[in-house]
Image: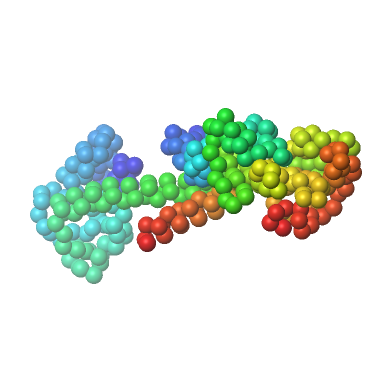
Amino acid sequence: MLRLKAVAAVGNSPADETGGDDRGSLHESGNRKSAIRSLRQKWIGSNHADWICPARLPRLSLTIPVNECNGDFSTVEGGWALVDRSKMLYSQTNHMRAGRFVRAVLFGAVKVAILAGVVYLVCMAALKASEATLPSAKELCDRVRPGMTVEQIETATRTFEGWQVLRYDGVMVISAHSDYDKSPVCRVTIDPSTHRASSMSIGPIQMGDWPTL
Amino acid sequence: MRKFVPKLSDWILLVLAVLLIVWPMLLIPLRGWGTLSFASGYREVHIGMTWDEWKQLQRRYGVEGTCDATDCFVDDVLRTYNVTFRKSGDEPLKIWSERVYVHFPLSYRIQLRDLYQAFRGLLT
């Protein structure tokens, strides 16, 4: 990454105008430290404070403005600044590291958020698909036969989601929906003398079908 | 095309994203020292089961539930199992309703409520 940036900076630099071979030397340097050392030698020289255009320094940090030094060397208005070049390079390197780290963390967080959204949607889609395959009240009632005991009815009508209630009046209410929504339920009347199913019916949910209703 | 091939870091981020979504489902069973799945235990629950039988069933499957008035809840990774007890006359407490539901995404609300209560407890 650094090498590419440094090469790009060299491309904009006066070295290109003079036909310098910085690009080649950067490629040969191979690692970051030697790249910085090489650039320092070529573009800064000794550690003097001097009038220098920040944009003509190797662009190692995003904090350095680009294309601000189009004036000549004698003007300040063109974006020239008095800098200690050695400190600037050191600062640039630190900024680069911190910037890289912050960018990587932010980018990773955004990626995780997007992936989490996708995973959430997949889970919701799977849930909706499983709800769609739940039996209707009619299908539940069809599983019940007259003469079945409460336990047999329970076993026959048990679904992935749903509820079963034996009301005080001996009516068993069965639904394959987890929520107490407006979808119809299956009602099985239990004969109090035999404790077996006597009749089945389908209808909307009513008060008393569930303790809280 | 090679740039579209997921890197190791992408897989790590995907695992983090999955954990971000499923953490309430992982935490809910832990809250009650529950189990990954109580489905087979729930199949043994029946209307008319007494309180003692219910506690025995829980012990057998190594789960603990939370009870609120007449309702008892057992959570596993995917679903919540809710039974309601009723007492009539001199008879012991007996189950008279049973309900099972998937607690996703409801689990987020439960966890956020628990976190909020814990936060309030810290403040007071």
Quarter of the image where one finds residue A129: top right
Residue drawn 90% across the image and 44% down it: A199
Picture residue at 28% right of the left edge, 47% below the top:
A97
Q: How many marks?
A: 0
Q: Position of residue A79 (x, y in %)?
A: 25, 65
User: Is B68 left or right of A160, judged from the image as shown?
Assistant: left
Residue A140, placed above or below residue A12: above
Foreground residue, A116 or A46?
A116
Residue A194 lies in quadrant = top right
Residue positioned 81% across, 50% down in the render: A169
Measuring 23% from the left and 48% from the top, which residue is drawn there?
Answer: A93
Q: Is residue A144 left or right of residue B119?
A: right
Please indicate, yes or no, whether residue A124 appears anywhere in the rendered image.
no
The reply to whether residue A4 is visible in this rendering is yes
Q: Is residue B116 or residue A126 the one in the foreground?
A: B116
Viewer-side residue, B47 vs A54: B47
Give residue A147's position: percent from left, percent from top: 88, 35
Quadrant in which the N terminus of chain A is drawn = top left
Q: Image quadrant of residue B77?
A: top right
Please say which color scheme the image uses: rainbow
* Image quarter in which the C terminus of chain A is found: bottom right
Extreme residue in the front direction: B90
Q: Residue furthest bottom?
A: A77
Q: Is residue A166 left or right of residue B116?
A: right
Q: Position of residue A207 (x, y in %)?
A: 77, 58
Spot occupied by residue A106 in the image (x, y as percentages of width and height): 40, 50
